[in-house]
Amino acid sequence: MKKSKVKIGQIDFVLFATIMLLVAIGVVMVYSASSYTSAFKLDDPEFYLKKQLMWVCIGFIFMIAAIKIDYHVIKKYTGIIMIITVVLLLAVLACPAVNGSKRWIPLGFAGFQPSEIAKYAIVLYMAKSLDIKGEKVKEFFKGVLPYLLVSGFYAGLILLEPNLSIATVIMIVTVIILFAVGARFLHIFAIGGSLVAAVGVLILIAPYRLERLMNFTNPFAHSQDEGYQLVQSLLALGSGGVTGAGIGQSRQKCLYIPEPWTDFIFSIIGEELGLIGCGFIILLFVIFVWRGIKIAVTAKDMYGTILGIGITSVIAIQAIINIAVVTGSMPVTGVPLPFISYGGSALVFNMFAMGVILNVSRQNANKN
């Protein structure tokens, strides 16, 4: 029998427009948040803008390539991607530490962060394996435990950097995928409880994590040391009010918030664009999740469904954690705001993943 050709339709335009709008907002806000510091320290107010535009262009090329190539092709290279990811996660441990962590492999013109690959490598692995496993996922030892062990292995390597936040994202995404494909609720509940307990232990055994947790409850009591960054973030959000001070008018970016163009860029958005701007960003992420889930549910096969769920979860979990940290709703941790925070490898891999999910949507359009 001849294999039927894949019918290709149009990509999900709402999702595409949402992604590009988030990226465009990111470029503007990275420039706004970084211009003062880069002018003061680097004598070039457009330094980070130029680099972010470069990464956007590279990411856009990767996204278009992923849209054009059938997403099933990636399945063939999942094993290779998994092995390369392990090698890179081990290689980063031999690199010089930056701010006490070994998270980047220096490439001269930029730093490469292997954990950004790991998040999506796990999604690719689970999509390929669960597509074959089917109903066996309801069994704990055969259907759930293997994925916890694999994800736990990658999360463990990332913990060595140390990077608890990204390791936690990987485990949360793993649980979400398992739940979505039919794992028993009792198993998911037990796993969730175990993960919470594990995070608690990791916090207790690391003094700096425990300090963050304690300072989170009352950052103003430690406003000149451990609670400084969160206090400055809250001041930025509060001073923005409803409508904000206007683009480029932030005061907290003027050497108050450390590197405001990275993890705490949402606080600058709040100061310059106000509650309205913050609300609009959150709305865009809500739309992203809605369209991602819709694409996953209507995918032509289980592989596409799991890819859609996994990719959507990676972005959604990071956005939730970042906004929660910046607004003082959870302890400070290093998770960037997807598409908006400054970053090279994160932006490129996120945009490639967007190309994959948009490719899934193309094949949904003419689903029989």
Image (spheres, helix red, strand yellow):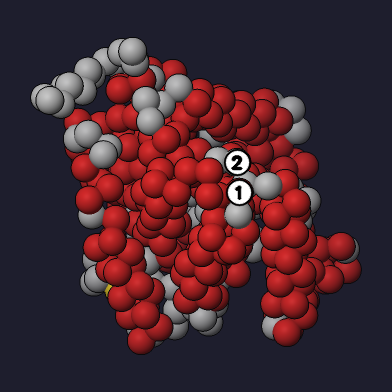
Residue kind at label 1, given as amino acid type: Lys
Is residue 299 or residue 144 the one in the foreground? Answer: 144
**Quarter in which the C terminus is drawn:** top left
**Quarter in which the N terminus is drawn:** top left
Kind of element beneath mark 1: helix
Vertically, is 285 above or below 140? above
Displayed quadrant of residue 148: bottom right
- Disc 1 residue crowd, few under 14, some 14–19, many 20+, Cα 10 Å: some
- The circle drawn on residue 182 is 2
| Horizontal and vertical percent position of residue 107 | 25, 71
The answer to whether residue 223 of the structure is visible from this angle is: no
| Horizontal and vertical percent position of residue 149 | 53, 69
Taking the view exactly as shown, the residue that stands out farthest to the front is 1
Q: Residue at x 71, y 72 (%)?
A: 198
Q: Are marks 2 and 1 in contact (CB under 8 Å)?
A: yes
Kind of element beneath mark 2: loop
Residue kind at label 2, given as amino acid type: Gly
Q: Residue at x 53, y 75 (%)?
A: 156
Taking the view exactly as shown, the residue that stands out farthest to the left is 2
2 or 1: tag closer to the N-terminus: 1
- Disc 2 residue crowd, few under 14, some 14–19, many 20+, Cα 10 Å: few
The answer to whether residue 189 of the structure is visible from this angle is: yes
Q: Residue at x 27, y 47 (%)?
A: 75
- The circle drawn on residue 138 is 1
Q: Residue at x 29, y 55 (%)?
A: 78
* Tag in front: 2 or 1: 1
Is residue 32 or residue 91 the one in the foreground? Answer: 91
Vertically, is 157 above or below 27? below
Is residue 209 or residue 248 the one in the foreground? Answer: 209
| Horizontal and vertical percent position of residue 98 | 45, 78
